[in-house]
Image (cartoon, rainbow, N blue to C red):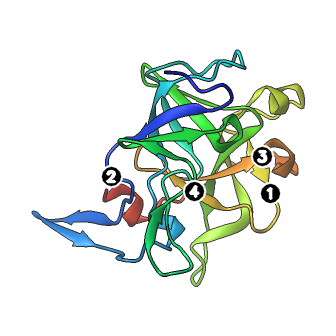
């Protein structure tokens, strides 16, 4: 079973990540299917597309766009699956909807994607420094520009597409969103909210 142009993936866990553990109880954070922030973005690759020779293989873990597993209400108010739904908890996922893959515990950003960790703001009133972070997962395009993992980088507004990977808040963006590379001062502190470590 292979698609011609799409990967076939299965969610790891539920389709929605709307519960956290508090003590020995589950706390439901959200009950609305419209909220994209609680949709699961982690999947297992079941089959690879025939049309491409890409590095992602069957069995790899991938981090994907939230619309793949998303549910919707149609014009009549009836709940339905996204157009990516195939059958039996399997979904089609195009290569441009995959942002990172993992094999044997090693993670690598995919195509033109990269991941940035926010930096903690030193003053009261703000949790993070706007538009500034640490490049956690780079790619070959950035490396040719001499921008490497652990460099401090700037990015434009509205690029904070949140992913929680290994209990760590990261922003997913494209290579072209990395605007500047900054020298390290040595006192930078990465920001990670408590909710990212409570899943």
10 left or right of 169 in image: left
**Distance from the alpha carbon under mark 1 to that under mark 2:** 32 Å
Count of all numbered marks drawn on residues in the image = 4
Give x and y (percent) for residue 67.
57, 56
Give the residue at x 61% y 68%: 128
Give the residue at x 87% y 46%: 176
**Distance from the alpha carbon under mark 4 to that under mark 1:** 24 Å
**Distance from the alpha carbon under mark 4 to that under mark 2:** 14 Å
Report the mark closest to the observer, 2 or 3. Answer: 2
Q: Residues at badges 4 and 2 in contact (C-beta under 8 Å)?
A: no
- Say which residue label 1 marks: 155
- Say which residue label 2 marks: 14
Report the mark closest to the observer, 1 or 2. Answer: 2
Label 1: which secondary element: loop
- Say which residue label 4 marks: 67
Give x and y (percent) for residue 90.
43, 39
169 left or right of 123 in image: left
Label 4: which secondary element: loop
Q: Residues at badges 1 and 3 in contact (C-beta under 8 Å)?
A: no
Which of the two labelled residues, at mark 1 and mark 3, occupies the earlier sequence position? 1
Q: Nearer the viewer, residue 17 or 179?
A: 17
- Say which residue label 3 marks: 174
Q: Is residue 43 above or below residue 171?
A: above
Label 3: which secondary element: strand
190 left or right of 180 in image: left
Give the residue at x 72% y 19%: 52
């Amino acid at each position: 079973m292979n698609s011609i142009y799409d990967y076939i993936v299965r969610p790891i866990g539920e389709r929605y990540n709307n519960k956290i553990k508090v003590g020995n109880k589950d706390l439901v954070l959200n009950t609305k299917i419209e909220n994209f922030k609680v949709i699961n973005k982690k999947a297992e690759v079941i089959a690879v597309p025939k049309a491409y020779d890409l590095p992602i293989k069957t069995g790899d873990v991938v981090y994907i766009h939230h619309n793949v597993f998303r549910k919707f209400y149609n014009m009549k108010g009836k709940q339905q699956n996204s157009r990516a739904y195939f059958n039996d908890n399997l979904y089609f996922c195009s290569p441009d909807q995959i942002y990172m893959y993992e094999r044997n515990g090693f993670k690598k950003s995919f195509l033109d994607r990269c991941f940035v960790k926010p930096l903690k703001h030193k003053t009261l009133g703000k949790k993070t420094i706007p538009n500034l972070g640490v490049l956690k997962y780079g790619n070959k395009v950035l490396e040719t520009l001499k921008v490497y993992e652990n460099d401090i980088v700037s990015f434009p507004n509205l690029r904070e597409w949140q992913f929680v990977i290994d209990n760590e808040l990261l922003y997913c963006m494209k290579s072209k969103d990395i605007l500047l590379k900054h020298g390290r001062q040595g006192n930078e502190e990465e920001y990670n909210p408590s909710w990212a470590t409570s899943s």
